[in-house]
Image (cartoon, rainbow, N blue to C red):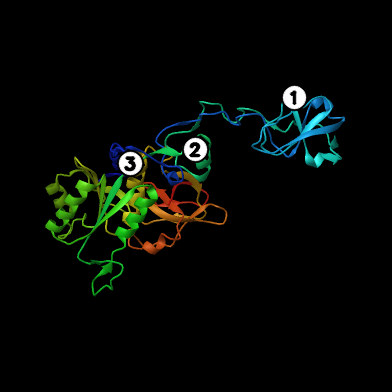
Amino acid sequence: MIPFEEALAISNKYNPVSKIEHIDLVSSLGRYLAEDIKSDINMPPFNKTAVDGYACRKADLDRELLINEVIPAGVPATMTVGEGQCAKIMTGAAMPPGADWVFMVEDAVEKDGRVKFTGKAGKDNIAKLGEDIRKGDTVLRKGILIRPQDIAVLATAGKARVPVAARPVVGVISTGNELVEPGEKPASSQIRNSNAYQLTAQVIRAGADASYFGIAADDETGTFTLLSKALEECDIVLLTGGVSMGDFDLVPGAFEKAGVKVLFDRIAVQPGKPTTFGVHEDALVFGLPGNPVSSFVQFEMFVRPMIQRAMGAIDIAGFRKMQLAENYERKRGRRLALVPVSLAEDMNVKPVEYHGSAHINALPGAYGLMKVPVGLTKLKKGELVDVRQI
C-alpha cells in the first residue's frame, strides 16, 4: 500500500496523446482549445460610435449644428463633417470624416434638421480602431475549456472551424455475477449496476467519449475477453469491482494475462483503498473499487485529471482552501480520508450524512470532497481544509 500522493505522482506521469481536430464553431462549445487563437483583424476595425447620437467636431459643441446626413450601422458616411455640421449616427456606425466627438441623443434637442447639445462635455463616445484587439494579438489560449463567451471571441477572430483536442475514448467495464442492468428487476442477492453508468457520466463530464463494454462475469475468461476488447479500442480503460482480495476478485489475473503492467494496487486512502493502476502498450488501465462512492471518488482523483491533461487543459480539477463550518471527527487516522461535504449557508463546508463507501445517496447532496490528512482524527470548526468540488 502506498501513500495517496505517491500514487497520484505515478499516474500523473502517464497521459494518452490527444490529436487535433477542426470542428465547426458552435460544436466547439465544451471542448478544449488545441491551439492559441490570434486575431486576423483589429477590433474595432474602424473608429465607431459607442452610442446613438450626433458625430461632430468637439470645437462645435457649444453651437447649433446642421445635420448633414444620417448614418446607420454598417453604412459608410457619404459626407464630411465640417464646421457647424454634424451627422446623426447610430451605435456601431463608422465615424464620418471630420468628426472627432459624439454626443448622445439624450443630451440633444433636435428641430428642423438642426440640433443643439444640451449636456456637459465628458467622454467622446468613440470606440477607437484596435483599442480592444490588435491584429495578431492572442485572444484565446490553448488549453481553455471553450465557453459561450469564448465562442463570441472565436467568431470575431474569423474561426468558423475551431482547432480542438480530440476526445480520448474511455472504456467502462463492470465486474460481478451479482450485477444486473438498471432496466432489470434484481433477484435475490443481486443489485443493479450503478457504477458503469455513474462512471460513463463522469467520463462524459470530463470531456471524453465513453464506451460501455458491459458486465464481466466472475470468471477470468469473461473479464479477460472484455478487457482485451477495451484495450484494443480505447485510450483509457476502467474496470469497477473485482480488485480486492476475495476468491472472485479476478481483475488482477486478467490484467496479468492481458499484459497490463500494474504500477500500484493499494492506496492509503479512504474510500478507495484497492484502486489499481496499470499501463498497457495500447491503453492506460484503472481497476476501481466496486463500492459506488469509492469508484466515484477515485475517478475524480485520478481519471478526471488524466482526461483533462490528455486534452491539454490548463485548468485541471484540484483542491482549494475552504473553511470548515462545524467540528469533524473520525475514529482512525491511518489513511487519508476524502469526505463528502456540502455548502453551509455561510459558504463554508460541512460533512454530509455519510455511512461509508456503499452510501451513494450521500453524493447527490455533496458539493465536494474534503481531504483529511493521515494522522488527523479531529478538525475544528473554522479550520481551513482542502476541498475539491465535484
For label 3, the crowd category at 10 Å Cα-Cα, with few meaning under 14, some 14 to 19 and many 20 or more, is few
Q: Label 2: few (<14), some or many (≥20) within 10 Å?
A: many
Q: Earlier in the sequence, mark 1 or mark 3?
A: 3
The three-letter code of the residue at mark 1 reads Gly
On the image, numbered disc 3 is attached to which residue? Answer: 5
> Number of marks in the image?
3
- Name the residue beneath numbered marker 1: 98
For label 1, the SS is loop
Q: CA distance from mark 1 to mark 2?
A: 34 Å
Residue at 46% x, 44% y: name it. Answer: 320
Looking at the image, residue 293 sits to the left or right of residue 39; the answer is left
Q: Which mark is residue 154?
A: 2
Q: Quadrant of residue 47?
A: top right
Rounded to the nearest angstrom, the CA distance separating label 1 from label 3 is 67 Å
The residue at the point 31 percent across, 67 percent down is: 182
Are the residues flagged by discs 1 and 3 in contact, CB closer than 8 Å?
Answer: no
